[in-house]
Image (tube, rainbow, N blue to C red):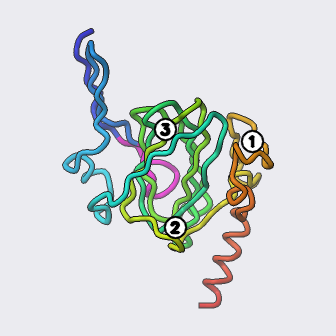
Amino acid sequence: MSLHIDPLSVSGSKIEGLQIINSKMVTEGRGTVRELYRQSSYSEILPNTVSAWNQVNLTRTRRGAVRGLHGEAMSKLVTVAYGSAFGVYVDTRPESKTIGAVVTVGLKPGIQVFVPQGVCNGFQALDDNTEYLYFFDNEWVSGMSGVALCPLDSGLGIDWPIHIDPNNREQISEKDSKAPSLHEILNLQSRENHNN
């Protein structure tokens, strides 16, 4: 096989600041090299507020299981290292022009999503042992500010590829299945803004 280079490319989405990135890939007879991050290239894509990744996590998730939707006080660069996933992103930022918008992205190795602070991130693994990789610009700490949103909220209009049984703890955590709906979060934010 001859050398083939797929350049880094990026596209926006209907959520302000959420970017879908096709990472640079070099493929030849031995296989593929994916460039997951290069400061000089990504500095033109990511906002100036992201200057370094302070924590990197890798989850391994069984087929059909869901993680999220969580929007902490950290920006994230997410991708799949192995397998595939159905990525879901919901804007819950009170001051955002795109609050309430939902974006879904089919994730496989080489496709990344930049998730701004306050945008909820979640996914469903489409293959056994899917490895989902997170780069965080802040370290996670217990009690950090953020939003948890129920991935089963029918108001989001998410068509999950694999049916989710809300009582199956191997498929969805109790915490995620009992998180508030988007409507409840927006009402709470509205009351908080009204009281300030």
Q: Who comes first in sequence, dot 1 or dot 2?
A: 2
Q: Residue 96, which numbered label?
A: 2
Q: Who comes first in sequence, dot 3 or dot 1?
A: 3
Q: Amino acid at mark 3?
A: Glu
Picture quarter containing residue 140? bottom left
- Foreground mark, 3 or 1? 3
Q: For mark 3, give the secondary structure.
A: strand
Residue 15 lies, with reference to residue 108, above or below; the image says below
Q: Amino acid at mark 1?
A: Ile
Q: Amino acid at mark 2?
A: Ser
Q: Which residue is rendered at x = 67% and y = 70% of the image?
A: 186
Single out the residue that lies furthest toward the left: 40
Residue 92 % position (x, y): 58, 65
Q: Which portion, as a residue range, is magenta?
A: 10-20
- 6 with respect to 16 (left or right): left
Q: Which residue is rendered at x = 28% and y = 28% of the image?
A: 33
Q: Residues within 10 Å of mark 2 (few under 14, many from 20)?
A: some
Q: Is residue 113 visible?
A: no
Residue on which disc 1 sits: 164
**Magenta span has 28?**
no
Q: For mark 1, give the secondary structure.
A: loop
Q: Residues within 10 Å of mark 1 (few under 14, many from 20)?
A: some
Which is more toward the observer, 77 or 14? 77
- 80 with respect to 46 (left or right): right
Residue on which disc 3 sits: 131
Residue 194 lies, with reference to residue 135, above or below; the image says below
Q: For mark 2, give the secondary structure.
A: loop
Q: Residues within 10 Å of mark 3 (few under 14, many from 20)?
A: many
Residue 24 lies, with reference to residue 146, above or below; the image says above
- 61 with respect to 55 (left or right): right
